[in-house]
Image (cartoon, rainbow, N blue to C red):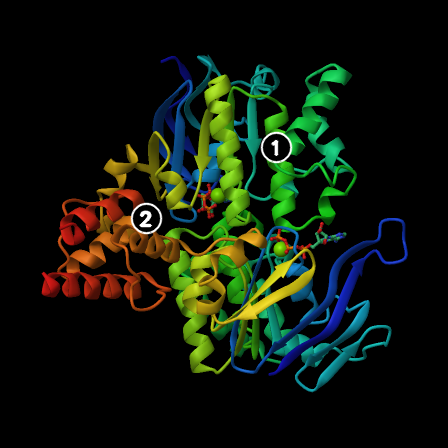
Amino acid sequence: MDIQLQKVSYAYAKGTPFEKRALFDVELAIPSGSYQAIIGHTGSGKSTILQHLNALLKPTEGALQIGDRTITAGKKAKDLKPVRQKVGIVFQFPEHQLFEETVLKDIIFGPMNFGVSEQEATKRAHKLIELVGLPHTILEKSPFDLSGGQMRRVAIAGVLAMEPEVIVLDEPTAGLDPRGRKEIMDLFLQLHKERNLTTILVTHSMEDAARYADRIAIMHEGKCVLTGSPEEIFGNAEKLATYRLEAPRIVRFQRELEAKIGRRLQTLCLTEEELARAITAAVREERAGQ
Amino acid sequence: MDEILSLDHITFTYSPDEPNVKNAVEDVSFTVHEGEWIAIVGHNGSGKSTIARLMNGLLFPQQGTIKVMNEPLTEENLWEIRSQMGMVFQNPDNQFVGATVQDDVAFALENNGIPYKEMVKRVHEALQQVKMDQLLNHEPQHLSGGQKQRVAIAGALALKPRLLILDEATSMLDPQGRAEVLATVQALREETGLTVLSITHDLEEAILADRMLFMNGGEKFAEGTPSEIFALGDQLLDLGLDLPFAMKLTKLLKQDGVELQGEHMTEEELVNDLWTSNFKK
Ligand SMILES: Nc1ncnc2c1ncn2[C@@H]1O[C@H](COP(=O)(O)OP(=O)(O)OP(=O)(O)O)[C@@H](O)[C@H]1O
Ligand SMILES: Nc1ncnc2c1ncn2[C@@H]1O[C@H](COP(=O)(O)OP(=O)(O)OP(=O)(O)O)[C@@H](O)[C@H]1O
Ligand SMILES: [Mg+2]
Ligand SMILES: [Mg+2]
């Protein structure tokens, strides 16, 4: 599903003394099937954008295109249910997303709300709880009696159970243990490819943005200031610094090594595996040249 | 070094009436000395936050004794002890009590009877340290995720505690914000001898600690310096952890046949070894 933000501005508590502008004329086009990362400093407006994507917030100026639906500032948007069915959001704080008595009820709520039978929804819940790395026994527990990382995993299972076309992830790995981080990010990528989803990832992990996304947008003080491929975005350290960001660890390591050996590696590497291959190639050249 | 905190054979369950439910914390003992920086790591649900709640007296163990500054923690001395202990919870929303950012940070100080002038000074200082001094009168609930975490950290710093307990306190900060908070905490350690216990999934942060406690299924699986813990290698993965970046890259390079002299935990060591073993003529 194509998504397009057209000069979207948003102010919290608009028209009150507490009015707080959070977005300024944001232009962003996310083509169907792409994996878009959004990065940016604390408070730059990332979560505010995400909440527009399923019309939890509506622009105070500008317009938003979600598939064939247009949501325009100042106009009443009727029947948002189809949008909410197609766009699943994993919120920054899982606590904001969980509310049922048991984990099972929580996971089946979304799909049943959109007309899936209880039997089918329960089947999905059992499958998903395993995919997010939790034991089946957890389905009977209260979601509020879980550890932070367990809650995060349940919230993710709940969104996946709706089988959305667009998956919106707000810091999905915060609170996950290191292995869970990798497994769950790999799971999102696998679903993205298999089901041809549109995936939108907000993250403070430059490493995840580099590894998983095919396009990156930078938010800075409520504006979308730069978009490009991971290579374009992370290849430019000075630009990143002006937005108070930095390149992923892998890229910083590559630059340090390049400075030490006095030449550049063949490509800008975005994963550990790529970097290991590029360094190995450089070591071989060095040996051959001696 | 003086002992500041100790857990002696601590066992805790959230459901004492249900014998079939596994204990959240099982027979855990460790000692922390004044001025140390301890990182607590372990898979989701391994008992880390429960330990934090036990140290803070939010929960009491069914078995074992917790001592803070050599005194067993009891309902009676709880408030006295808490005034020396700054705690940042995993979810900042659970921590906010004030209607504005500055009220929130002031709250614990007011409870501890800090004089007004001193309180105002500390609140401003702490909010400056986390770069939140622009949003003094904002409602804490209406902040971005990272801003909330910064306010929660300021609340703990303003107490000027002897012991600081951080439960994934920087998990939603941008990389720069994370580095700034770590630098602030480091500076306080040097200036005031602050003791820090940091529960974290960030292995690059854990490397910097003096000592690590590694939890697994409610039990203490291992305890040691970061080099000792990360030497566990593939066992780490089985128990929900991973290798830090430099060690992972070292492993991949060795698999590819690149010559290296040792296992490297830090990037600097690895760059230097790569250079001396492969490029230096
Ligand atoms: N409910 C709210 N009411 C008023 N202002 C808000 C509210 N939520 C967020 N803001 C403000 O809007 C701005 C953008 O917030 P947003 O949550 O979109 O940031 P973010 O980029 O997601 O940050 P983080 O990385 O810290 O999560 C911030 O300055 C924040 O203080
Ligand atoms: N309030 C609660 N009531 C009942 N059980 C709980 C409660 N909080 C946690 N638990 C359970 O206790 C165990 C330990 O949880 P704890 O929150 O201490 O883990 P953790 O190591 O902090 O995990 P995480 O990395 O996910 O934050 C888990 O099995 C969890 O499900
Ligand atoms: Mg956010
Ligand atoms: Mg926890």
Disc nearer the start of the sequence (2/1)? 1
Q: Work out whether residue A85 can be spotted.
A: yes
Q: Quadrant of ligand 3?
A: bottom right
Q: Chain of mark 1?
A: B
The image quarter containing residue A31 is: bottom right
Q: Chain of mark 2?
A: B
Q: Is B86 left, or right, of A264 in this rendering?
A: right
At x 68%, y 62%, the residue is: A223
At x 24%, y 49%, the residue is: B235
| Camera-side mark, 2 or 1 | 1
Viewer-closest of A221 and B122 = A221
Q: Position of residue A46 (x, y in %)?
A: 63, 60
Residue type at mark 1? Gln
On screen, A142 above or below B92? below
Q: Which residue, given by chain and number where applicable, does mark 2 sit on? A: B244
At x 20%, y 49%, the residue is: B275
Q: Position of residue A62 (x, y in %)?
A: 79, 73
Q: What label sits on residue B129 in the rendered view? A: 1
